[in-house]
Image: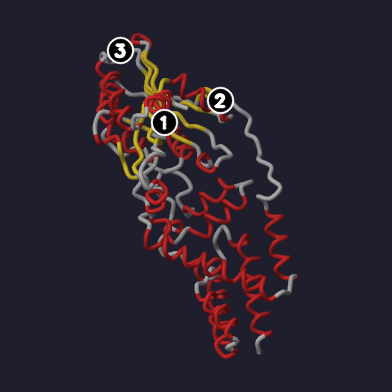
């Protein structure tokens, strides 16, 4: 836990207020950077928690003559924010930049068992000073807050924008794999996290099927910096490992494809009608949730979600008519849903999660068929 967060809880002071006061005190004591100062980009490895699946990016500034070694981190948010969950879901939760000592920063990642890599930037002293001044100015103003967006504004994009603004040109851009979609780029990050992979594949809409041209992932930035040139010279020095930790593969008895397959087989062989109706009800409710989030949320990734063709709200209507024993309505709603499932399969066929979702398409179609057959 960062020392600022600890002090905020100890003194019962709002975290953002304490950060603001802390930054004023620190910046007032800082002298201009010396020629020995360095600026570097830190890339932190992925973790096994949901918040750490994509890694992290931060900026480090050191100056041995001032005994300065500080890390600026754009990935902070305050759990005490009123209506935190609603704001996070809607997409207007305010993230902000914080400054930690390097020892604190590296200690956290050592505790979490995540490697940290450093790329020192070949910047002139005036540009280093400009960057340093801008970071401290941001800490002391409302600029320290920004509205988080999963692809367009996060800890990596904020650093990219800051560096490009400092050097006065958009030299740092995504330079590889731009022919892939965001969905294809993100999919491997969920390896060994089966239900997170399945869930995000289901809740994301059409935006993640666009070409991945935005530099928004930490390790994409690391690779981009390796080949970025500024004034015909490499912008960064070779990557240095500050903390090397062997990645661990999470083991879960339930979070895997086996339980997913077992659940679907159970639905197929458990012929009790109430089980099938409960399953279709859950699928329909999820579809309503996806539609609501696409309308309510400011996260562009959730809009225009064609997964509602499978998680279809009309399944709730089908369940209603089954309970009403309306055979004609059951028949026509079955045809409607089969048509939606077929269209969904065609839409999904060339996308990364196709083989994950194909069994669910098949089982849902089969349960609709079985209910339709029972009510003829």
Which residue occupies 62% across, 73% down?
Answer: 277
The answer to whether mark 2 and mark 1 are in CB contact below 8 A is: no
Check contact, mark 3 vs mark 1: CB within 8 A. Answer: no
In the picture provided, is 354 more to the left or to the right than 89? right
Tell me what residue is drawn at x 53 percent, y 43 percent. 50
In the depicted view, which residue is nearer to us: 278 or 307?
Answer: 278
Looking at this view, is 85 or 34 the one in front?
Answer: 85
Q: Residue furthest right?
A: 269
Looking at the rendering, which quadrant does residue 244 occupy?
A: top right
Horizontal and vertical percent position of residue 93 = 36, 46
Q: CA distance from mark 3 to mark 1?
A: 21 Å
In this picture, is 70 found above or below 285? above
Picture disc at residue 58? 1
Percent across and percent down for residue 166 are 28, 31
Q: Which residue is mark 2?
A: 110
Mark found first going from the N terminus, 2 or 1: 1
Label 1 residue SS: strand
Q: In which quadrant is the C terminus drawn?
A: bottom right
Query: Residue at 47% across / 55% down in the picture?
Result: 181
Q: Counting residues from the N terminus, which is met first, the one under dot 3 or under dot 1? A: 3
Measured Cα–Cα span from mark 2 to mark 1: 16 Å
Q: CA separation, marks 3 and 2?
A: 30 Å
Judge by depth and name the residue closer to the eye, 326 or 298. Answer: 326
Name the quadrant containing residue 98. top left
Residue 234 visible, this angle: no
Any mark on residue 34, and which? 3
For disc 1, the neighbor class at 10 Å (few under 14, some 14 to 19, many from 20) is many
Task: State whether residue 180 is above or below residue 96.
Answer: below
Q: Secondary structure at mark 2?
A: helix
N-term-proximal mark, 3 vs 2: 3
């Amino acid at each position: 836990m960062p020392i600022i967060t600890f002090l905020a809880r100890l003194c019962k002071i709002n975290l953002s207020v304490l950060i603001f006061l802390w930054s004023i005190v620190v910046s007032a004591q800082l002298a201009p950077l010396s020629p020995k100062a360095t600026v570097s980009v830190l890339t932190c490895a992925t973790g096994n928690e949901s918040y750490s699946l994509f890694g992290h990016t931060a900026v480090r500034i050191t100056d041995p003559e001032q005994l300065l070694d500080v890390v600026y981190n754009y990935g902070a948010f305050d759990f005490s924010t009123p209506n935190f969950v609603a704001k996070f879901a809607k997409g207007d939760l305010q993230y902000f930049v914080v400054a930690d000592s390097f020892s604190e920063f590296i200690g956290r990642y050592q505790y979490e068992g995540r490697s940290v890599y450093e790329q020192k930037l070949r910047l002139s002293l005036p540009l280093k000073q400009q960057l340093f001044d801008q970071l401290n100015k941001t800490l002391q103003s409302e600029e320290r807050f920004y509205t988080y967006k999963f692809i367009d504004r996060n800890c990596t994009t904020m650093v990219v924008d800051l560096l490009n603004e400092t050097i006065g040109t958009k030299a740092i851009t995504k330079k590889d794999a731009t022919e892939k979609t965001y969905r294809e780029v993100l999919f491997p990050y969920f390896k060994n996290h089966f239900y997170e992979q399945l869930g995000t594949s289901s809740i994301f809409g059409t935006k993640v099927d666009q070409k991945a041209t935005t530099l928004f992932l930490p390790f994409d930035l690391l690779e981009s910096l390796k080949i970025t040139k500024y004034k015909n010279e490499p912008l960064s020095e070779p990557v240095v490992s500050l903390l090397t930790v062997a990645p661990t593969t999470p083991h879960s008895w339930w979070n895997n494809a086996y339980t997913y397959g077992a659940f679907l087989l159970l639905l197929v062989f458990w012929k009790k009608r109430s089980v099938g109706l409960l399953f279709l009800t859950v699928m329909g409710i999820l579809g309503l949730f996806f539609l609501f989030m696409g309308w309510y949320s400011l996260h562009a990734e959730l809009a225009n979600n064609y997964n509602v063709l499978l998680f279809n709200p009309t399944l709730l209507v089908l369940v209603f008519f089954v309970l009403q024993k309306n055979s004609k309505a059951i028949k026509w709603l079955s045809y409607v849903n089969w048509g939606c499932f077929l269209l969904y399969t065609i839409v999904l066929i060339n996308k990364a999660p196709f083989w994950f979702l194909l069994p669910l398409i098949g089982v849902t179609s089969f349960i609709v068929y079985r209910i339709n057959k029972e009510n003829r």
